Structures are given as structure tokens and as C-alpha cells.
Image: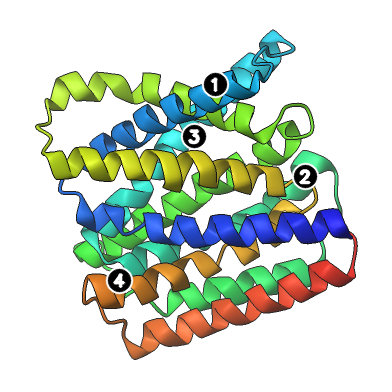
Amino acid sequence: MENKQSSLIQLHIAVLLFGISGLFGKFLTQPSIIIVLGRVFFSSIFLFIGLTITKENLKLKSRKDMLIIAFMGIVLAIHWSSFFQGIKLSTVAIGLLTFSTFPIFVTFMEPFFFGEKLKKEGIILAFITFAGVMFVIPDFHMGNEMTVGAMYGILSSLSYAVLSILNRKYVKEYKGVVIAFYEQLVSLIVLLPFFFIMEPVFTRKDIFLLILLGTVFTGITHTLFINSLKDIKTQTAGIISSLEPLYGIILSIFLLNEVPSVKEIAGGLLILGTVFYSTIKNLKNKN
């Protein structure tokens, strides 16, 4: 029980920081791919220094592990790029809330990966979360930039679901910080060509924000989240992660003056209800 409570605390801290990180999509004027490139550049350095200091073993056990973790790094690059693009095209609220649909994907993918039984309660909770997200999509016309942003948010959630499931599988074989390092190093390698193609120009503000995003809001946060999966099911973690848009929305009201509509508030309340229910349920029962 103590391990589960510790993992829940780590998970909630990580989700809070992830919620704040969404605002960087508005603070930074760089294209989404360049933001992610800067993010993984500084996070990789940060994690490598930490791993060197603690003398962690970075050796992977097999070629198969190398290939799968490399694939995870590619998925991470897709996830973060679509995440920031969704926020740039719409609002922090729409970008974060559409991203939070990922528990739906996890609910149906997790039994396939781990041979677990698909539970009716999990399906109901996932669809309640999805119903909440549907409140925030303005319309379903792809000519609407807000709707396109929402679609990027859903792509972000799908890629995140895949990443979370694979993280759960490999966190039992390697430490979370080691997995996080390799994922972000691969993302850096994959995205590096875009630096030479797009030739971005950085201001001092850009560099400061990218360092902050890469260290505190990525290196530390990503490790906390992965470590929490040792004692928390991915589906439960996914529903708790639905708190992320609420943290981001609250901050965007004060920092960006992006006030959510009544529909967005209603959707947020639906999501929050499933989060609290899942957290209480997880404390009482073993996964």
C-alpha cells in the first residue's frame, strides 16, 4: 500500500508539471517541432548528467530492447510535436482536453499488450472522459482551425497511449530515468534534421524557456511519471492524467487570459469526476 501511495504522489506531481508545460506552446513563438527539439536537447543533457552522477547502468539487455526503446523515442517525438501544434492552433484548454482522451485508447489497447481482462468499469470511465472532451470541440468542420488543433490533440493522445503502455512494460526491466533518457535522446536524433531545414533564430527568452522546459518540466517530470507506473496501471494513470488540462486551464486564465467557455467547464467537470473516482478506487484495490 505504501508503494502505491508513493507512486500516486509522484504521478500527481508529474501531472501538475505536465499541465504547466502545455503553456510553453503559447509562451514560445518557435514552431512546434523546434520547441520539442529544444525540449529534448536540454532534457537529454540534464538526464545524462544525473545518470552520470548516480552512476546508473545505461546498458540495454538486448538488441530487441534497443529497437523498441528507439521506437518509443520516435513515438515521443510525434506525441510532443502534435501536442504543441494542437495548442498553437487552438487554445491551451482545447489542446489539453483533447489530449486527455488517451485513456480511451489505453482501455482498449492494454488488454492486447498485457493479456488483461477488459473491464466494463474501465470502459465506462473512459467514455465519460471522452464525453467531457467532446464538449470542448467547437464543431466538426476541418476548415475550423480550432477543430484542426483538436485533431492534433487527439493524435497526441493516441501516441501517448502507445508510449505509456510500452513504458509500463519496460519500467520493470529498466529504471524510469534510463528509459526517459533514451526516449528523449532518440527524439533528439529524429528531430535534429529539422533544425537545419527550418534554421530557427533563438532569442535569450527562447533559450531560457527551453532550458526550463527541458529540465524541470521534462527531465524531472517524465522520470516521475514513468516511475509511478511500477505500482499504478496505465489505465488508472491515464485517467488521473486527466487533471493535466485542468491545471493548464486554470493557469492559462491568469497568464494568457484564455477564459474557457461554459461547455469547456462542463467537460472539465466530467473529467475531474472520473479522476477522483479512479484515484480513490486505486487506493482501495490492487491493480
Closer to the N terminus: mark 2 or mark 3? 3
Q: Which residue is mark 1?
A: 70
| Residue lying furthest bottom | 262
Tell me the distance, in whole angstroms, between the alpha carbons under discs 2 and 3: 21 Å
Q: Residues within 10 Å of mark 1 (few under 14, many from 20)?
A: many
Q: Residue at x 54, y 23 (%)?
A: 182
Contact between marks 4 and 3 (CB within 8 A): the answer is: no
Labelled pair 4, 2 in contact (Cβ < 8 Å)? no
Are discs 1 and 3 less than 8 Å apart at CB? Answer: no
Image position, residue 26 (x, y; %): 22, 57
Q: Earlier in the sequence, mark 1 or mark 4?
A: 1
Tell me the element at label 4.
helix
For disc 2, the marked residue is: 230
Amino acid type, label 2:
Lys
Q: Secondary structure at mark 1?
A: helix
Q: Which mark is residue 252?
A: 4
Q: Earlier in the sequence, mark 4 or mark 2?
A: 2
SS at mark 3 in the image: helix
**Separation of marks 4 and 2 at Cα, in angstroms:** 32 Å
